[in-house]
């Protein structure tokens, strides 16, 4: 079987090494803690998904960049659609958008972060 592309693997949260095993446990809409639960290692190739303690600290900065882009998008959209500018409503919209995007950005930033450090097809580094 042909393995998925880097982009597909990154966007769908697959293991960066084999691009098959899922990084995250399946999310249930009525159980918010499941939106953020990660597997300890790959179910296909046993690649560790936490290579060292605090590995995902850097993913916070990726998430910060995503949120900045989201805030700018909300600001521009609000400026076009609102007849009267209100800082209060703009901030409320930004908070709402950030809250709705949180699980998505959490998974995407962690996926991007581990894809930066674990190359495709590399040998396992057990620690
Ligand atoms: Zn794997």
Image (tube, rainbow, N blue to C red):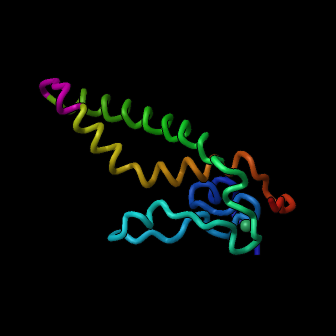
Ligand 1, image quadrant it occupies: bottom right
The residue positioned 29% from the left and 37% from the top of the image is: 94
Side of 102 relative to 9 (left or right): left
Q: Position of residue 34 (x, y in %)?
A: 44, 67
Q: Nearer the viewer, residue 54 or 76?
A: 54
Question: Image quarter for residue 61?
Answer: top right
The residue positioned 60% from the left and 67% from the top of the image is: 39
Question: Image quarter for residue 69?
Answer: top left
Span of residues in magenta? 83-90
Q: Which residue is farthest left?
A: 84
Side of 35 relative to 48 (left or right): left
Which quadrant holds the C terminus?
A: bottom right
Side of 73 relative to 36 (left or right): left
Q: Where is residue 28 in the image (x, y as percent from the top left)?
A: 40, 71
Q: Position of residue 54 (x, y in %)?
A: 63, 47
Q: Where is residue 60 in the image (x, y as percent from the top left)?
A: 53, 40
User: Vertical placement of 64 versus 125: above or below?
Assistant: above
Residue 50 colored in magenta in the image = no
Residue 88 colored in magenta in the image = yes
The residue positioned 33% from the left and 51% from the top of the image is: 100
Q: Which residue is farthest right?
A: 123
* Numbered label tally: 0
Side of 91 relative to 17 (left or right): left
Which quadrant holds the N terminus?
A: bottom right
């Amino acid at each position: 079987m042909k393995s998925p592309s880097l982009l597909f693997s990154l966007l769908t949260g697959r293991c960066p090494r084999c691009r098959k095993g899922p990084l995250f446990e399946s999310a249930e809409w009525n159980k918010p803690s499941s939106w953020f639960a990660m597997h300890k290692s790959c179910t296909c190739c046993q690649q560790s998904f936490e290579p060292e303690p605090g590995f995902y600290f850097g993913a916070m900065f990726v998430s910060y960049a995503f949120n900045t882009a989201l805030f700018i998008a909300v600001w521009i959209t609000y400026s076009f659609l609102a007849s009267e500018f209100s800082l209060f409503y703009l901030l409320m919209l930004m908070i709402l958008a950030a809250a709705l995007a949180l699980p998505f950005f959490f998974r995407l930033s962690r996926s991007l972060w581990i894809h930066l450090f674990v190359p495709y097809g590399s040998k396992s580094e057990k620690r």
